Amino acid sequence: MVAITQDIVPFNRTEHAYSAVEGLVGTMIQPYLLRLSAPVDTLLVKRVLRQMVTLYPKLRAVIEPGLHRYHFRILPDDLVVDQLFELAFEVQPHIPVDDPAALQAWHRQCMHHVVPLEKGIGLRMWYVPHAQRPVLMFGVPHIFADGMTMLHLVKQCILGINGLPMEAMPIEAPSMVGAIAPALWWQWPGKVWRSRQHKVAESQLLASVNVQQLPRQPRPNYGTSGLSQGALPVPVADLRKAARQLGVTLNTFLTAAIAQTFLEQAPDDPKAAAVIRTSVDMRRYYAKSAGHGPLWGNHVGAFLVIEQGPGKSLQERVKSIDASIKEGQSRFARREMCWTYLFEELMPLMGRTLIGHVGVKLRRADRFPQISAHATSLGDVCGYINSKDAAIQVAQFSAAVNSISPIMGLMEVNDELLCSMIWQESETSADEVAAFSEHLGSTMRRMVREVLPEPAHDHKVH
């Protein structure tokens, strides 16, 4: 455990990276949109959100330069935080939240909000009162919270709105080395060597394939991010049933559909490959003996699923994807991801200026690692954040994050599978993303119908 000294909390390697690229890519804010099932008094919403700032001290943190590295400083829960909170909370009754296009446009606008990280506080809130179903937008920069932490914050907020007790969220700051370190010290050389072998083999494979991507025109600078949201045109119950019939998880089935859609862009190219970056919750890999708590903050890793062969059958596709995902996850379990992550642990020694300079050079040369998309899943959102007996429920939900590469955020909301697509608008047009989304929906329909003799009727995409 890295020491937390009074009000100072050290960054982990992920948080240092976010602080270093802030100037290059903009605030990586995560606006989560919540449509509530019944009207809620504005003052109650405001009071609950202010209580959350008290219960999760990181929300009132600022990033502050030390002698050599930046860190979080937790502001005292006093008048200054009260004043900053007043600026961070806005009531916007003019937003036409019953218009889906206007609601999505507002969500995209909030995704580009800039948060002064060195002044605070670490969240922005927008509330739209409504006679039947008000909307709360709750945005936190990624440097303060990953997706799991965000969902827990949302859950606490809904508890508070319902008058139920909210939980304090303690701050912990363990080095992420604990999630990759072997159980015994003498295992380090072998684990590092095998991790390096995996990385070398992966690099050689990537160099030999043509990575399928969304149509794009590289630019020397980052611009605005596009946001497209909607339900996939297949009932989630059918998707889950089809996955079960094939002997895989729903996430594996969805990843197979995404890979298939990319590969069908180049059906005659034997070198075509779909490269899907897949998120991993690293909390499960910390040793239990370390005594960590829930580890709110940033504890996310990733691996690549590299899939080839546009002509594979459905059974071959899901079997191949399933093997790739299980191998990626098992490398974390076997502690064979340390080669890459140990280098990343050393990156903070470079300092923000040098890391930012490297980022600018890579961007101008279009040399950042190429992937087809980053696919991440939040799971059954409403099942997690809604309490069964609560009067006020989350009736509609969507999540987004400002991003430099294409992201596909999958989430189950009230028996629908939603997909948020985020991309660089200067590189790829909205029409091109819409065409890909339609192709993905068609792929999923075809896959389900191949497995289920009588699937349910398609959902309308909205």
Image (cartoon, rainbow, N blue to C red):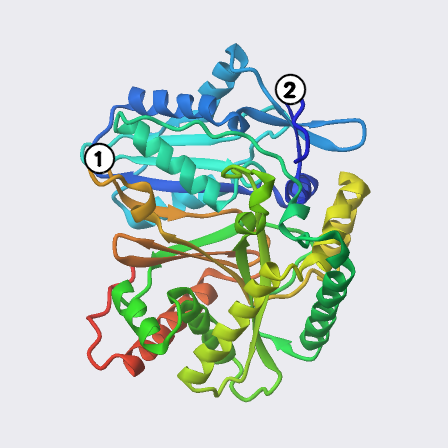
Picture quadrant of residue 33: top left
Q: Position of residue 189 (x, y in %)?
A: 78, 60
Identify whether 24 is placed above or below 370: above
Q: Amino acid at mark 1?
A: Ala
Front residue of 38 and 415: 415
Q: Residue at x 65, y 62 (%)?
A: 218
Q: Position of residue 79 (x, y in %)?
A: 51, 10
Residue 390, disc: 1
| Contact between labelled residues 2 and 1, with CB atoms less than 8 Å apart | no
Of mark 1 and mark 2, the one earlier in the sequence is 2
Distance, label 1 to label 2, CA atoms, is 37 Å
Residue 6, disc: 2
Identify whether 145 is placed above or below 301: above
Q: Amino acid at mark 2?
A: Gln
> Does dot 2 land on a helix, a strand or a loop?
loop
Q: Would residue 401 be visible to someone looking at this image?
A: yes
Front residue of 160 and 119: 160
